[in-house]
Structures are given as C-alpha cells and as structure tokens.
Amino acid sequence: MSLFGRVAAWALVVGLASACNKPDPEPAPAASATASATASAPASVAASAGEAPPRPAPPPPPPPKQHEDPRQVLAHIQGNLERLAAGEKVAKWPAGGEPHPFEGLVEAYQAVLAGETSAADKLAAVAKEARSQLEGRLRAAELSLDKPKPGDAADYARKVSAIAAAKAEGPEGTMIRLVATMRLVDAALVLASAEDYRNAEYDLFKRSDAYTRTERERFREGDWLRLPCRTLLGRRSLVEAAAKRLDKAAGPLLSCPTPRGKERDFDLMERFVKDPGAVVAEVLPEATEAPKKEEPAAPEPTAPPEPWDLRAAILFMGEKPDAASKPLEAAAKKSTVGKLDHALFLHALRPQSAARDENIKKLLGEVEKASVAAAKKNDDTFLLEDASIDRRVYDGTDESLLGIVRVASASGAANTASAFYAIPCAVLLARPKLLESTTPLFGGNRDNFLPRSGCAWGRGFVRGFPDRELEAYTQASEEADGHFYVNHGGSLRFGLAAALKAKEEAMRIDPKSLLRIPTPPTTWPYETWSYMTPESRAMYGRLKRLAEDLRTKLVAHDKTRGLDEKQANEAAHVGLFQVVWGAACGDAAPPRSLRKLVVDGAKPEEIRAFLQASEHEKAVLEPFRACAKHTGMDPLVHMAVLNAAALPILWEMKVDPARAEELDLVVDPNAPNHFGKTPLMAAAQHDRLDAARRLLKRGAVVQRATFQPYEPKLAHDARTPLMYAAARGSLPMIRLLLDAGGDKYAADTKGRIPLHYLLGHGPVRPNPNLSPADLAEAAKLLF
C-alpha cells in the first residue's frame, strides 16, 4: 500500500474512533479517547531468529478504587468540607473504602470552625503527611529527568510548608495554617494524579501543566481545594489575612462562584453567601465571546475595471484570462511565486501551442532551480529524491506538473502563505487533476508544507458554492468527532487534516470525482453513531439539520456544474460523508432492532409486540457492535431515557443476566456506561423528567458518581446526576433530584459542586435552559 493509502486507511480508523461515546468532561460531550499499546513480536518470529521467545507482558494492575484515586480523594474532601460548613454530616466512602490520611483536613476544618484548641495539632498532623508526600513526588519528578530542572514547584512546596509549620497565633494564625495545609494537601494530590515526568514542569502556583500536547492532557488545570463559601460569614478578616499571607500560593480560596478576576472580591462573595438568588447575575462568568448573529451571506466579489493588478488577476483569471495575462506575466519577472502562478495560468487557461509549452517549460525550469536551491539550503534534499513527490519534466499533461508544484511548496521556494503555496482556484477549476498535489504524502507534519487549494486560501473562489453552509456543517462535526485535531497528540494529524481538506476541495472543485466513490451505507452522516449514546443522538439531530441544508444547496450548485439531477444528489450525498470523520461508523444500523425501535420513538405497543415475537433475539446487531468497537455504546436503558414510555416495557422482559449484554438487553436502572455514567445522569442531562421519575421509582441511585481511573482523564470526574441537571436540566428536574436525596454538596475532581455547574463555573456555561428567575431560584436551592 502506498504511503497515502496508509494515511487514508488510518484516517478511516481514526474517523470511526473519533465519533464516539466520549467520556463527558462536562455535561456536554468532549474529547474522545484513543488508546495505544505496543506488542511483543510473536514467539515464532523470535525463535526463528535464534532468540529466546520474549516473556509475556505482566498483566495490567487492577483499576484503583475510588478511595485510592487522588483526584477522587480531592473530590471527597471538598464535598465533606461543604457538608460541614452547611451543618450536614460528612459522607463516607462506599463499603471497603478506607479513609485517606489527607481526610484529616476535614476534621481539622471542623475544629477550626468550632474554635477548638485541638485544631492546631490536627492541622500539624495533616500538614506533616502532605508535606512528606509532596516532597516525595517532587524528588521522583526530578529523578525522571535526564537533567533536573529547577522549577516553581519546589519553591511552592518550601513556601507553603513554612507557613503551615508556623506557630498559630489566635484565630488569624489558625486560619492561615488551615489554608496552607489545604494547599499542601491539594498539591500532593494533584502531583499524585499524573506520571512523575509530567510533574517536573507542573506549575503549582498556577495549577497548570506545561508538558501537554493535547487539550485532553490538561486534565489537571485548575485543580484546587477551596474553603466552603460559608466559611466567609463572620470570618472575612481571617480569610483575607490568609489570602495576603500566602500571596500567589493562595489560589482560589473560597468555593463562592465568582467571575474571572474577582476571586478576591470579598464584598461580592459575602453578599452571595447571604442571598445567592439576589446576586446571580453578578457572579455569572463573563461571556468569552458575543453570541453570533445570523448575518446574510456576503455578496460574491465582482471583477474590477481593467487594467487589473495582480490580486484581481489571481481572483478572476478564470473569468477573463486576457485581462489576467499582463499582471501575471509581470509578476513572473519578480518572484518564484509569480513564475509558478504564470506557468499554471498558461497551462490551465491559455490555448495549447508549441510557444505556450516552451514558455511554461522555461518558467518551470526557473521554479525547479529555485526549489532545488531552497531544499539544499534547508537540508531538505529528500524532497528531491523521494519518489512519491513524482518530479517530472513538463510534457503538457497535468500529471507532469504535480511534482514541481509539490517541491516548490514543500521547499519554501514558492510560498504564498507562511508554509505553503496555494494553487489559484481558477487553475484548479479548469484542471481538477492538479488537486492531487494537495493530498498528503508523508503522514505527518511535513504534509503541512505541501500545496493547498487557493479556493480555500484566498486565491480565488467557486462562484455559487455554499461555503457558509459547508463551514457550519464541518465545524459542528468537530464536536461529534471529539475535537480530534486538538486532542490528537501525534504529527499524523497534519496528514489526516490534509486528506480531509482534499475531500472538501473535491466537493468544491470537482464534484464529478465524488461519483467514483462508493455510496455511503446510511442516509445521513452519523446515523448509526446516533444510536450509541443519548448525547450522540442529540448531536445527530443538530448535524442532520445542517446536513439537510447543505445538501439542498450542493445539489442546486452541482447542477450548474454539469451534473444531472441524479448525479448531483449522489455527489452531494457522498460529499457529506467525505468531509467529516467517522460519518458512517462502519455500516447502516440494522433495520429492525430493539435499540432502533426505542431510539426512533416507537410506541409501547410496537415495542411490546416486537418483544413478544422474540424478534429481539433474532436482530442482527453487528453494525452497532462494529461502531461500538471504536466509539463505545451505552447500555440500552440509557437510550430508553429518550423514550420514557419504553422503560416499563423493557422492565417487563425476562432477561438472562448472562446474555443481557450479548443481546443488547441491559435494562438495569443503575447500569453504568464505561466511565460510570448512569441512566439517571443521562435523563438529567437531557432533561427527561418522565424518564427520571420512572428510573427513581425503579430504584435508580441518585448518589452515584462517574469514575474514570485511567486515560482518558475526565477533567471533571465524580459527576453526579444533580451536576448534570444543574448544567442543562429544568428547575423541576433539579427539584426532583433534590427531593430524591441528591447531594448538592458532592464535589467533582476539580472541587466543583452542582452550584458551579448551574452558574457556569464548572465545565460548561451557565444553564442555558433556565430563565433568570429560575436560575436565581435554582441557585438558592443548590447553595
């Protein structure tokens, strides 16, 4: 298989893996997970080489229990601090969970609040243990490096340890020691949550990780313990003294929700404690960007009066080649870019003749000379030797131009942007074959330097093409694919991006080429994937609406490009799948299955008849399983929250527990998905009030929390149904969960409680489904 073939094949795999049931780092979906492993050579291969067979790899360690996971410990401590401040009893670990040594901080906090003389001794014991563990983590981090680097982490540990060890004088001194001890505790827990080498450059003052390649690796950013907001009442001067004493090591001291930049606005926080509903508008985070207004599409540019400058010649050469000729010829005398532009213009838009071909050869010879010199200067001579570049002597064919355009761009000899040459759009429209030069060759960062289409890079446009609709559709798909490019740690992403972009340009430039691609198996992109999780189903609805709009406009445009009605529909259909990752997810969903019936909103009697006829045992589930291999698949009961009337029918079934998963019949009201999300969490997230009521009546546990001990790290793990409801649910949903015993003091692994999720200080923006009055009421309920 060619290198490009390998890249394309890998792109398919990654596409399927991206559009997945992603462990939500927030109540809306986030980055998907990919795992990699290395395997030993088969024993037979090693033996044939005269070597002893390799020893089998040791089995992986068992996953840690929640009370052993440092990030879960942080969440547990924060929750118990909140409970104590509110006068509630502290929560214990599930059966078998031993208290962590750092949980002594909770007892110390209680003693500080009560003014007990034992507070100093309790703080000293916790600080000693935390300091010991923190120093051990820092030593291990130094040893993990070839050359130890002095860092802020050691300065942080020294400064905070000294403050924690200082003699406490009165309530102010005790509060300062409490905060310093809390900072030793959360620092030790944060460092314990990642590999030693990642801690070498971790900034404990800012709680940010310098050693990251992807957004997913930033899971520790902003990890802090906080004193409960109620601590401020009657103790404001003490808290302010602690903030001043610890200075930049203090971090966010209180759990009061405050906008960025107001973490020390004690007046605002004090007013919030006294009346949360009255100051909701003041504590909401500032919008990161203004809401986008739907604006009419900008009119397409029109050719200016002649004579043209070079920019006009590039933009409109396809419409008036004669007017473009002189400025292009003049530019060819000034730069290598000008020479390449002129050569391509002559090839694509001027009649063939011996004189034309000689002129092109001369121009390309100068481009070739400049490219060779640039490659040698940059020590990139492999460009001149790599057969995949396909350098040829110009013979009048499109194929003979591909190599020189690639080398001119990749060597930097003829760049129209910082790193590449963009082929004029009019040239590509006239000679679509040249688009091949933009496809990836290397499967990595070097693909960034190959040519690109000027239709997408400001060197022309395709008149009448629905660019705005295409952009809306592809941008929305990024959420479905888990923001793959942002979260892909390797340089292969550049090759994958180039391959996907080439498909998008084929849609613009050569829609007929899409007719050579096999017809996708599903009617709409992401259709099969939409049956995997409730969240994927919700995203599918949004994507389908965008796809429908784009398809209508593509069909109309393609008919102006010479395609008949049938061809235009086929090209548009294929194109929708080609320009996004994982759109087919393997194959079309089975036409008849219990999962499909439930998700598609079948009526109870239809579902009951299906079950009574035992059709569920005969359903072909392989398409779902194929998709699930790359994406994960939530239990059937999760999907049923979207069709609450189906739940009682499913619970009527007599299911052999040993075959429930095999037959996709998992209907337990507490059945978790692979990262611990329960059906009740799904119902809360999608505000399915009827489903939530039925689940609770059936025994759904309202106190469950997500738990993801290994990669991908959930930035906000330990999420509860109430957190999901606070983020996106209605006021009745929030009340329902509170009445059912939902714990409003439970914290996630960043120390955030449901109140933060409600007001946009957790992983998502403020609850978008509540009116200002309901938001204020919810804030009072959750405080």
Image (cartoon, rainbow, N blue to C red):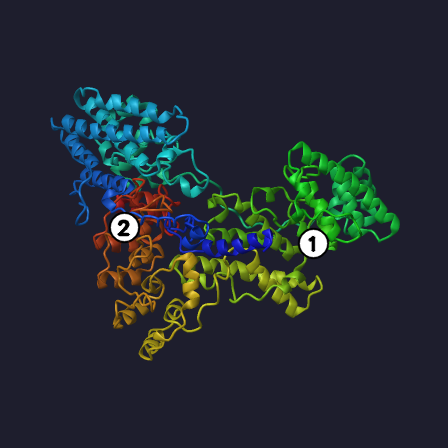
**Between residues 238 and 568, which one lies in front from this camera angle?**
568
- Residue furthest front in the image: 50
Identify whether 64 is placed above or below 601. above
Q: Position of residue 722 (x, y in %)?
A: 28, 51
Which comes before the other along the chain, label 2 or label 1? 1
Tell me the tag on residue 11: none
Tell me the tag on residue 705: 2
Q: Can you tell which of label 2 and label 1 is closer to the viewer? A: 2
Q: How many marks?
A: 2
Q: Quadrant of residue 172?
A: top left
Mark 2 falls on what kind of element? loop
**Between residues 78 and 514, which one lies in front from this camera angle?**
514
Q: Which amino acid does label 1 sit on?
A: Arg
Separation (CA) of disc 2 from disc 1: 53 Å
Which image quarter is the C terminus in? top left
Can the viewer see residue 687 in this picture? yes
**Between residues 145 and 511, which one lies in front from this camera angle?**
145
Read off the residue under disc 1. 463
Which image quarter is the N terminus in? bottom right
Residue at 49% x, 51% y is 478
